Image (cartoon, coloured by chain):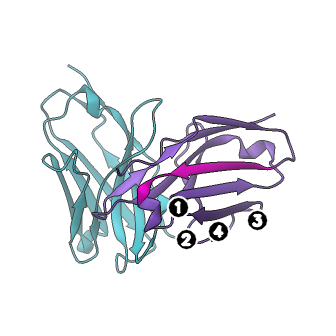
Amino acid sequence: SSELTQDPAVSVALGQTVRITCQGDSLRGYYASWYQQKPGQAPVLVIYGENNRPSGIPDRFSGSSSGNTASLTITGSQAEDEADYYCHSRDSSGNGVFGTGTKVTVL
Amino acid sequence: QMHLQQWGAGLLKPSETLSLTCVLNGGSFSGYYWSWIRQPPGKGLEWIGEISHTGNTNYNPSLKSRVTISLDTSKDQFSLRLSSVTAADTALYYCARGLYASNINWFYPWGQGTLVTVSS
């Protein structure tokens, strides 16, 4: 299957740590990239590769991967981290596939 | 700083052809894949397809029969055409620069998005 499955929603207390997971067979061959999307805005790349952040992304965002699961961790969550998060990878044919998305609420 | 700006018709009737264009400002096509992604209202992201700087294309199998992505480097732009649209094609459409190399891939930056509504 080329699907990438994410939990629909998670919540985290301000200043605490939250982990968002993405599961799928395609992750055994490709690293996931992660995107943050706030209401009314285009997605923004936050993590790619083994654990790389584009310029301007805070270091509280980190990524990891094991087997068929990729994870995005926000350490010390801030109010501005409340958003939808999507993972992305490639299937065995090289076609792009996005995860189902996770809504993160910061309490 | 490189950015993408997109435009196209926002209201279509069923069976018409969707046409969107994305222009590259401040960068080069070389070495990247130029991608289209869409998001139906209130739903998640869907990869539509991409074109490399050499003209190689990859399309989402579910859309492949209706999609054409083209590149015009002389105008610094790439385009999406989706034929025979239905209400199910109503979505916010994004263009994006993609890197697809070895086991790493990402999309950055993204265009501002164009809302396309299909309605009779």
Q: Position of residue A18 (x, y in %)?
A: 75, 47
Specify the subunit that label 1 lies on: A
How many C-alpha atoms fall within 10 Å of the one at disc 1: few (<14), some, or many (≥20)?
A: many
Specify the subunit that label 4 lies on: A
Residue located 43% across and 50% down the image:
A98
Q: Position of residue A92 (x, y in %)?
A: 32, 63
Element under disc 3: loop
At label 2, the amino acid type is Gly
**Magenta segment, which residues?**
A17-25
**Cα–Cα span, label 4 and label 1:** 10 Å
Position of B87 relative to B101 (above/below): above
**Cα–Cα span, label 4 and label 2:** 9 Å
Q: Are marks 4 and 1 on the same chain?
A: yes
Which residue position holds label 1? A33
Which residue position holds label 3? A59
At label 1, the amino acid type is Ser
**Cα–Cα span, label 2 and label 1:** 7 Å
Q: Colour of chain B?
A: cyan
Which residue position holds label 4? A53
Q: Nearer the viewer, mark 3 or mark 2?
A: 2
Q: Colour of chain A?
A: purple
Residue located 37% across and 74% down the image:
B32
| Residues at marks 3 and 2 touching, judged by CB atoms closer than 8 Å | no
